[in-house]
Amino acid sequence: MKEIGINSIEELFADIPAEFRLKKRLGLPYPTPELEVRRHVKGILSKNRTSTNMPVFLGAGCWPHYIPAAVETILGRTEFLTSYTPYQPEASQGTLQALFEYQSMICELTTMEVANCSMYDWASALGEAVRMAARVTHRIEAIIPKTTHPERTATLQTYMKPIGVDLKPVDYNRETGQLNIEDLKEKISAKTAAVYIENPTYLGFLETQVKEIADETHDHNALFIVGVDPTSLGILQPPGEYGADIVVGEGQPLGNPMNFGGPLLGVFACRDDMRLIRQMPGRIVGLTQTLDAERKGFCMTLQTREQHIRREKATSNICTDEALTAVAAAAYLALLGPRGLKELGEVVISKAHYAMRLLARIEGVKTPVFDSPHFKEFTVNFDRTGKTVRDVHKQLLQHQIHGGKDLSREFPELGETALYCVTEMHSKADIDQLVDALEEILTEEES
Amino acid sequence: MFRQARWDEPIIFEMGNPGRRGHIVPQVEEEIKEAVGSVETILPSKLQRKNGLRLPELSEAEVVRHFTRLSQMNYCVDLGLYPLGSCTMKYNPKINELLAASASMTAIHPYQDERTAQGILEILYKLSRWLAEITGTHEVCLQPAAGAQGEFLGALMMRAYHEENDQLEERTELIVPDSAHGTNPASGSMAGFQIVVAPSNENGCIDLEALKTTVSNRTAGLMLTNPNTLGIFETEIEEIAGLVHDAGGLLYYDGANLNAILGKSRPGDMGFDIVHINIHKTFGTPHGGGGPGAGPIGVSEKLEKFLPVPRIASSHESYYLDYDKPRSVGKIRCFYGNAAVLLKAFAYIMSLGAEGLEEIAEIAVLNANYILKKLRKIAGLELPYGEGRQRKHECVFSVEKMRKECGVRALNVSKRILDYGLHAPTTYFPLIVDEALMIEPTESYEKEELDRFIGTMKRISHEAYNCPQTVLEAPQNAAITRLDETKASHPKTMRLSWRMHSKRTGSS
């Protein structure tokens, strides 16, 4: 204060008009020592019942997967955690190279050539993807399956409303869940900017007509957008091989905890086509050289697309993204490698099918609802048990089990149906526990 | 002499050996295998991945060494001063990280029964009330993942408000000052508004006379940062708010600079209808090399009904998710927000309390004014705009004089700062200042660390006037020398992934 010539701190705030000066202290807690903060916050958190206490059979866009200890160690590096956006590349090569490697791994998984270094989540990535398609094609409609995750559909609607893009929902086959191609043919037109599908779908089954959908889309010069759960791509055909132009998805299961649904990791990738690349949202890291061409190095690239340069003409407003979750994904994929990711897919699909097989034996339970191949999630219908999903799940909680996602409000046409998820986290014993509990709950009532 | 680690670390795809692995996935139990058979029988052949997946094949130790070496080529808050203007790079208390890492936070699913998630719901609910108190707003929504998403949501709230009043068709213009953050015009335009720029006056504040001619019945709203990006408090805020409100527009507060007025003044009291908060700036959560952050918004009572669903509500000591909001703008993302980040902010506010938050503003402003006072004496540095006006949390210097006199630009100065083991200020922003260096020290650094920065600036000025080549060739001590950014962005030479690189060099 002496150096700057003031006698009281108050002088520094003298220019704030008196009527806008806060006359009282904020109504907040008193300053609290660390020990008490720790006890207090831990105390509140202990009211949560976690997946470590009891198995959770929930997925629906946020999945329980094992996080290798090495991922946590790498993310614990304070140089990754407490650094800023790499606007000064010379002092940020660590983050930049890690993000370049993340982008590269996403490209390998999806067989695309370009990926950005993260969006907020799958839903907002989808919103941005369809906006991008509308800019590229100068068209005003987009087609989405009725089986899309309702929260993603709702987010997409929010992102579309200001630009007036109309969403045309396409129906699904009630027996198989597969997209109704006839309905698609009816709705697609010269106004269609993009056709979107999810694979695996929100309802857990795999879309088997991907090639037909891609062809139909491209016949109308629209862009084909595919949404993915990247953990499936060790065993499933990658979207680039069946004609995707843009791939979006949720990267949370690649080494990031569920965290009550956030932070997540929006995956965003596209083909090597300047028409697309110039319209991409988000930060992209590129490989380059030093000016003296002595060494390789990394920097943020194509920044003229971004808000800090292009302002209102930017391809997106995104600034802060989910960089650290992308570093986690890069470390996770590096640890698992091609064999690990393939085996993960095999374990998940085997366990999910084991669970379906056992659950289907319970009187009145139908699973899966759709006669199609499934990955890690599947629908379980309770209509013929005379119980609602709500009741069943309430009782499952008493058996120390978190049941699946209740779909009865989102998809009333499916009746009392829930979406269950099984991953490598679920041991045979966990699955058997679920089956036994359901048997008890559902037969008990009848007797 | 400072030297940043300079590993000649290969790209991860160039490392390892076929067959090597860093993590073993649990195997399927024999009984399950017997029951369901092989994957080939479950999964139709045409759906299977046929071509091998080209991921690196490394041991766990190799992966850890690789990323540890990379990390060493990063500057970070825990290494020293990070004076990025508008970015509020403050210290990130370690207790918050520890709490966020506990299983009772990480291992909860967003769709698990509300009765089993009472802990996190309580934290989010209370945090939203605290943020409402801090910003002087009625209700706070925690969902936006970042400040820019908060801005987008704020602009959508404006749309919803004008739509309800049947004025959306006329109200097509969103006003942003010429000194605004790039996200402001980008967010407004994403929400479908035309952007109208309001000029600054010689004080670096909004030119009220010019604003009068800009505001009309086409105005949907005005986005403003206060203190503004020059660090100057917009003292005519009452007149500005009156002008916009009288014309039927709404006032939006960009919370990037909220740190400067914590506990001293509240945007809601100044007349702002919508306020966003950058949790990763003001409330001390780490930036993670670009994210995740969180960008909650607070709104006045008349806008509450438009907030996204679900709202976190409380009744009789229990907490629940309320989806029954028919006027809501809908969803802007999945689930409820970046909960793990928000938990850290909860612990941060609890630690500091009302008193501590006020002290933050005091020290942050004191630090900025100390730097300002010292840097003004340095040759080649000038302080444009607002002569005689106080600065709050940051100050913007121009090195235009240095550029004219010795050819050293803001870019060169910032690169030279890296050579001394400090981070550079924000450069070339705000756009109304030529050769701008925007400096925000925050409250987190002691006088000694500030003096180290000031001393560095003095040396660089001396070098610029005596041996400019040293400054022009900087950085030499960072992990790498200046990069060819043109090559990185040119369609012919760009390499945006290893796949693209292999394809273009024909090595795949």
Image (cartoon, rainbow, N blue to C red):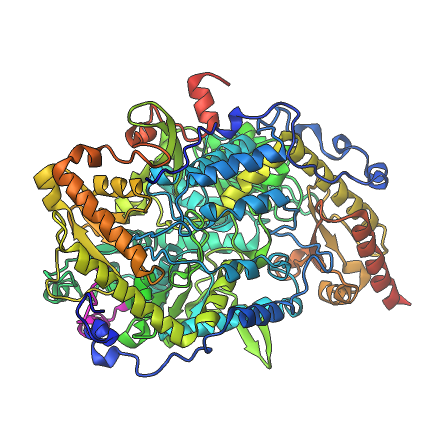
Q: Is residue A84 left or right of residue A332?
A: left
Quadrant location, the N terminus of chain B: top left
| Vertical order, B441 against B366 (above or below) | above
Q: Is residue B238 magenta?
A: yes
Residue at the far top: name it: B506
Q: Is residue A65 visible?
A: yes
Q: Is residue A9 magenta?
A: no
| Place of residue B341 in the rendered image (x, y in percent of width and height, measured from the top left) | 49, 59
Q: Is residue B260 left or right of residue B130?
A: left
Residue at the far right: name it: A447
| Residue nearest the observer in this picture, A13 or A431 | A13
| Place of residue A100 in the rendered image (x, y in percent of width and height, measured from the top left) | 45, 35
Range drawn in magenta: B229-250
Residue at the far left: name it: B405
| Place of residue B449 in the rendered image (x, y in percent of width and height, measured from the top left) | 31, 55
Q: Quadrant of residue B294?
A: bottom left
Residue at the far front: name it: B1
| Residue nearest the observer in this picture, B384 or B124 | B384
Q: Quadrant of residue A328?
A: top right
| Residue nearest the observer in this picture, B272 or B322 | B272
Point 60% across, 35% down: residue? B61
Q: Is residue A251 left or right of residue A272?
A: right
| Vertical order, B404 against B367 (above or below) | above
Number of marks present in the image shown: 0
| Place of residue B426 in the rendered image (x, y in percent of width and height, measured from the top left) | 27, 49
Q: Is residue A246 visible?
A: no
Point 12% across, 47% down: residue? B380
| Residue nearest the observer in this picture, B352 or B291 | B352
